[in-house]
Amino acid sequence: MTLELPYDEVPADPEQRRPWLRKIAWWVATVFAGGFAIAQGLTSGVVASVAVLLFFALPDIARVIRLRKTTLLYRAVHEPWVPLVFVIVYSLSPLFWAPLFTAGLGWLTRSLLIRALRYGLPRLL
């Protein structure tokens, strides 16, 4: 049995049905990654803290050195999936150097923050 809609009705986009849910999800991910990056930076030492701050500023550094928005490197710096893969691969590898992990967390936090700000603050009421 299928559900048939009248000809004048179009099914709503998933983004239009619950726009506030996507906003909340990006903000929760940003706060979680940011808190984890700060905690790891504080417990792992000065070099790890500097790595968090440096990689948090990575999108700004890409803008300062005037990377074109059309380049693959510029898009990779701003996508949240690239640092997420970096953190996961580091976690599964036998490497152990805390500044690498915290740098990935700082980069992930900034990428998530950019995405969360693009969608705006959630309005629940």
Image (spheres, helix red, strand yellow):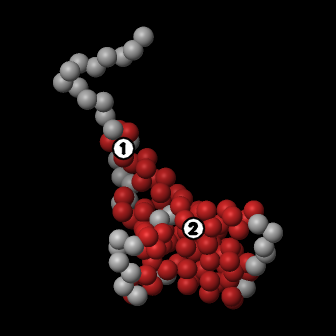
Q: Along the horizontal axis of the image, is 95 left or right of 24?
A: right
Residue 62 place in picture, x, y as percent:
43, 81
Asked which secondary structure carries label 2, the reply is helix
Q: Earlier in the sequence, mark 2 or mark 1?
A: 1
In percent of width and height, residue 43 lies at 74, 79
The residue closer to the viewer here, 12 or 86, is 86
Residue 83's label in the rendered image is 2
Residue that protrudes farthest toward the left in the picture: 8
Q: In which quadrant of the rendered view does residue 29 lie? A: bottom right
Work out whether residue 124 or residue 84 is closer to the camera in this orientation and state it: 84
The correct choice, above or below, for 104 with respect to 99 in the image is above
The image quadrant where one finds the N terminus is: top left
Quarter location, residue 71: bottom left
- Residue at image point 66% right, 75% down: 102
Q: How far apart are labels 2 and 1 at the CA level? A: 25 Å
Looking at the image, residue 22 sits to the left or right of residue 106; the answer is left
Q: Could you say which disc has been placed on residue 46 in the image? A: none
Residue at 62% from the left image edge and 87% from the top image edge: 50
Whole-percent x, y for residue 4 in the image:
31, 17
Q: Is residue 38 visible?
A: no
> In the image, is 5 to the left or to the right of 44?
left
Question: Does the CB distance between marks 2 and 1 fall below 8 Å?
Answer: no
Q: Which SS class for mark 1?
A: helix
- Mark identifier at residue 15: 1
Q: Nearer the viewer, residue 18 or 99?
A: 99
The local crowd at label 2, few if under 14, some if 14 to 19, many if 20 or more residues have their Cα within 10 Å, is many
The image shows residue 36, relative to residue 17, as above or below, that is below
Which three-letter amino acid code belongs to the residue tagged 2? Pro
